[in-house]
Image: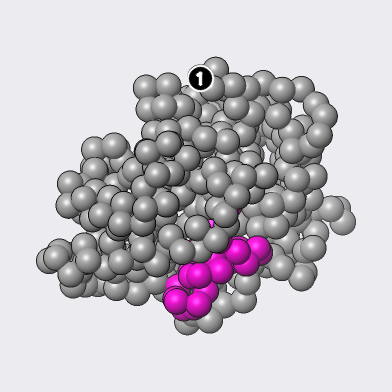
Amino acid sequence: MKQLLLLFIFFSMVSLVDASQLSRTKPMLPLQVGAESIIPLWDLADTVLQQNLEKVLYKNHTWQQMIQKKKMTVGIVDLTDPSKVHFASVNGDEMMYAASLPKLAILLTAFYCFENKIIKQTPGVMKDLALMIRKSDNQAASRMIERVTMERIQKVLTMECFGFYDEAHGGGLWVGKKYARSGKRMPEPMKGLSHAATASQVCRFYYLLAMGKLISRERSREMLGILVNPGIDHKFVKTLRKISPDSTLFRKSGTWKTWHSDSVLVWGSGWRRYIAVALIDDPQGEMILRQLIPEIEKTLKLAAKKSKSTSIALGNFPQEERGSGGGAPIMTHDFF
């Protein structure tokens, strides 16, 4: 009885702060869009956005060399007008070691298991998911892998309804080892990587979340509630909190040795509604990611100036969940 009471209190509090944080966005995330509006990301590639992204990246000689050596991969999704989404990438289908970034796959698998009643959605499990995403806690991630199993993670990633690991698109997200020194290793088949990602597939992950199409709208909303309010202030987030402190950030990053990766869904005002993903193999990767996000924003701002859709009226979207804003961070001191 006590456990049931604690569970009720936990989800009641999560629901309240989740709504408060997400209601800062107008329109609300995840978006309420018809199935006909959900076009595969691969089909949303935009020539102009692609040219602008390449121009911004290639003007930096060091970045140009890294791109040519396939040590840098970048993907962006312009969500300014959800009915006219635009996608661009450089080395987008190049799979790289991604450290903690593929913990997104563990998050998805956990919610797949909740939905299919394979494991229970308890306060302890939810605490581990929050620690795994916001703090990138490796012990919490390993506990989650034990709960859902590595085999099931890989099954979910390759399911047709998700397709987050697809050899036709260079591979993608993969978790083939616990986040620990020892343990069974089940690497992905293309490059033999234990923790892998491509920029394109991570862009797809956030795109489907934003559209409310990962498992269901409510499950997408719950996952966004865990990704919001990052607990580590570095890479993309370090810069974004300076240049756009009022934007809501949904984020997962990864770092190991020379491998640095970051991914973020930025939801602010005007044109500042986008997804950015980058994976870098370089000792200076953390600093490169800080420098990269303003250049990505230049690309998106330029696209907004040239697009008639930038004046889109918020009234075109459902607003019934709009709140007063100014909410507290989700699941912080009360839970860990």
Type of colouring? one colour
Give residue 73's position: percent from left, percent from top: 42, 43
Q: Is residue 322 above or below residue 209?
A: below
Q: Which residue is mark 1?
A: 190
Q: Residue furthest right?
A: 2
User: Is residue 80 found left or right of 113 in the rendered image?
Assistant: left
Which residue is found at the position 80% from the left and 45% from the top?
Answer: 139
Q: Is residue 161 above or below residue 267?
A: above
The magenta region covers 227-254
Q: Quadrant of the C terminus?
A: bottom right
Give residue 236's position: percent from left, percent from top: 51, 62
Which residue is found at the position 50% from the left and 52% from the top?
Answer: 263
**Residue 185 quadrant:** top right
**Residue 175 quadrant:** top right
Q: Is residue 89 above or below residue 12?
A: above
The answer to whether residue 231 of the structure is visible from this angle is yes
Q: Residue furthest top?
A: 189
Magenta segment includes 235: yes
Q: Considering the numbered disc 1 on the image, is that residue within a helix, a strand or a loop?
A: loop
Amino acid type indicated by mark 1: Met
Q: Nearer the viewer, residue 292 or 45?
A: 292
User: Is residue 73 found left or right of 334 in the rendered image?
Assistant: left
Give residue 37's position: percent from left, percent from top: 25, 46
Which residue is found at the position 74% from the left and 63% from the top?
Answer: 9
Give residue 40's position: percent from left, percent from top: 29, 38
Magenta segment includes 311: no
Q: Nearer the viewer, residue 256 or 13?
A: 256
User: Is residue 144 found left or right of 317 in the rendered image?
Assistant: right
Which residue is found at the position 47% from the left and 82% from the top?
Answer: 324
User: Is residue 60 found left or right of 108 in the rendered image?
Assistant: left
Q: Nearer the viewer, residue 43 or 129?
A: 43
The answer to whether residue 209 of the structure is visible from this angle is no
